[in-house]
Amino acid sequence: MTPLASPAWQALTSHGETMRKHHLRALFADDSERFANFSIRADHLLLDFSKQRINAQTLALLHAYADSVDLDTWKQRMRDGEMINASEQRAVRHMDLRAGQLAPPEVKAVLGRMQAFCEQIHSGSWRGFSGERITDVVNIGIGGSDLGPRMASKALAAHQQADLKVHFVANVDAADMAPLLARLNPRTTLFIIASKTFTTLETLTNAESARHWLVAAAGSDHAVARHFVAISTNRTLTAKFGIANEQVFEFWDWVGGRFSVWSAIGLSLALAIGWRHFEQFLAGARAMDEHFFSAPPENNLPLTLALLAVWNTNFLAATSHAVLPYSQSLSLLPAFLQQLEMESNGKQVNRHGQALDTATCPILWGESGTNGQHSFYQLIHQGGQLIPSDFIALRTSDFPLPGHHSALLANCLAQSAALAFGRSAAEVRAAGVAEALIPYKVFPGNQPSTTLILPALTPATLGQLLALYEHKVFCLGILWNLNSFDQWGVELGKQLAGRLTPLLAGTGDASAFDASTRGLINALRSS
Ligand code: F6P
């Protein structure tokens, strides 16, 4: 059944019409217990969603809708390893990667190899071609083979290993790779080629350049074995690239790229933060898995985030969603979540290939606070568009300096309050503002937000946080009746780029392309 045809959805539609008329000011005035009524404490996390434009009936209707689509059955089907990614005929088993003692033997085996490798690099027993120890690791990957470890390495900078620098190269633009190579020493640099498919143009182009650089310095191909490892599901292509089987860390087609930071794709992260911390990261995610499967719906953090997203998107007509971490260490979280949420749920057809008749994933964007306050917050406050936000704050700082953290937290709370409650013309007038300026100084408010508070940013809490959003994405796929685990929309551009590459190099016939593309080819060729 399409969501639109469901009685629970229809009840939400008519309730939405009523709720659109309410201002958060009135919702707070009417309920002195609103914070207690609309917040969840679980596993040392606090989720305050009292500043969402909801009331008790909204939540009840949203939960009724979740029941009507058999969300619990789908959760179980995922956990049982059923092929819920039907269009790719794959199971969705990233939770198995962080299942600890309950992980499947093949997962434990790869984790064991990763641990041993980390110990060799950290202890210095792994040596480069000249006999020197490794000082720099470069992860070459893109999308899910880059964003997770890149974001998490930055997030956990306070927990980093001494004496090893980990770098990330993703873009096929040589401006990513070339300046880094210029700074590195080939004798002490290790490359990790991270690609689930091992067919990704950007990654293979960067990997070839890295190999040329290394071989030129070493004077022999033999050096490759001491300086290249691969992470992939495709051992045929890793061998073709010249990486021996024992230097390949495997994962499996049942791990989606954007859900793969827990797999061998996390090797660069494990090298950056050390094995003990990587295990804590997995354990944090496992704790969130346990919460997701055991907490009752009304206390379930991922489900609550997903229901609020459905509410804002489908019943209040929000088309974008801001992620605002008040943590510089989490500054790459919005970029990570862009892939996680939009590649998963930015879909036009349902699980059966039929056109969806409801809006799906909003455009997700964001920036760390307080930086964003000095650029785009103006639009959220006064731009006239409904923009729900997630504020994320840490109770204690990962890099304490006197005076900084209280100022950071004060700004976080100030912004969510200003967005929710605004400032009326009467308040502006009462503050003595000249009449002509009053329209400029009014803040309409009523911008919904959720605030998530983590006790601190540690490997474990980061694991919890990422798994929280992963499960939110899963729930949304079920609530929107789509497959969150395929990504067919990335294919067309890749195919066209493959055809355009020789044309830009000056060979081939461009006549099959449209006039605009032909004009651009000519302009680029002649420059
Ligand atoms: O183009 C999108 C995508 O397929 C993502 O889904 C994936 O994370 C990324 O490219 C990288 O893919 P791979 O790990 O196979 O190189």
Image (cartoon, grey):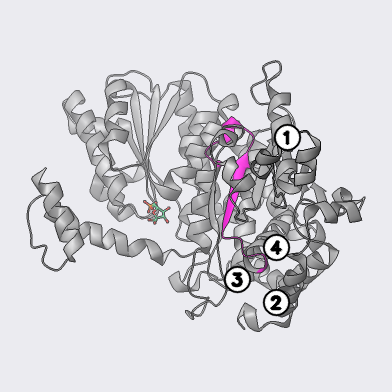
- SS of the residue at dot 1? loop
x and y, in percent, of residue 192 in the image: 37, 38
Residue linked to disc 3: 480
What residue does disc 2 label? Answer: 9
Q: Find the distance from the CA under tag 2 to the CA under tag 3.
A: 11 Å
Image position of 160 with respect to 498: above or below: above
Image quadrant in which the C terminus is located: top left
**Residue occupied by mark 4:** 307
Rendered view: 376 above or below 136 = below
Of callouts 1 and 3, the N-terminal one? 1
Q: What numbered label is drawn on residue 472?
A: none
Closest to the camera, between mark 1 and mark 3, is 1
Query: Where residue 198 sits: x, y (%)?
Result: 32, 52
**Type of the residue with mark 3:** Trp
Please tell me which residue lies in front, 191 or 153: 153
Depth check, mark 1 against mark 2: the one in front is 1
Query: In whole angstroms, how far apart are the C-alphas of marks 2 and 4?
Result: 12 Å
Query: Of the residues under marks 4 and 1, which one precedes in the sequence?
Result: 4
Q: Is residue 212 left or right of residue 371?
A: left
Residue 212 located left or right of residue 53: left
Q: Give percent across and percent down for residue 300.
A: 76, 57
Q: Position of residue 333 (x, y in %)?
A: 55, 42
Counting the numbered discs, the total is 4
Horizontal relation, residue 310 to residue 167: left or right:
right
Q: Residue 302, located in which quarter of the rendered image?
A: bottom right
> Residues under labels 1 and 3: Cα distance?
47 Å
The question of residue 318 being in magenta is answered with yes
Among the two numbered marks 1 and 2 on one chain, the one whose residue lies closer to the N terminus: 2
Residue bounds of the magenta highlight: 315-333
Q: Secondary structure at mark 3?
A: loop
| Circle on res. 433 | 1
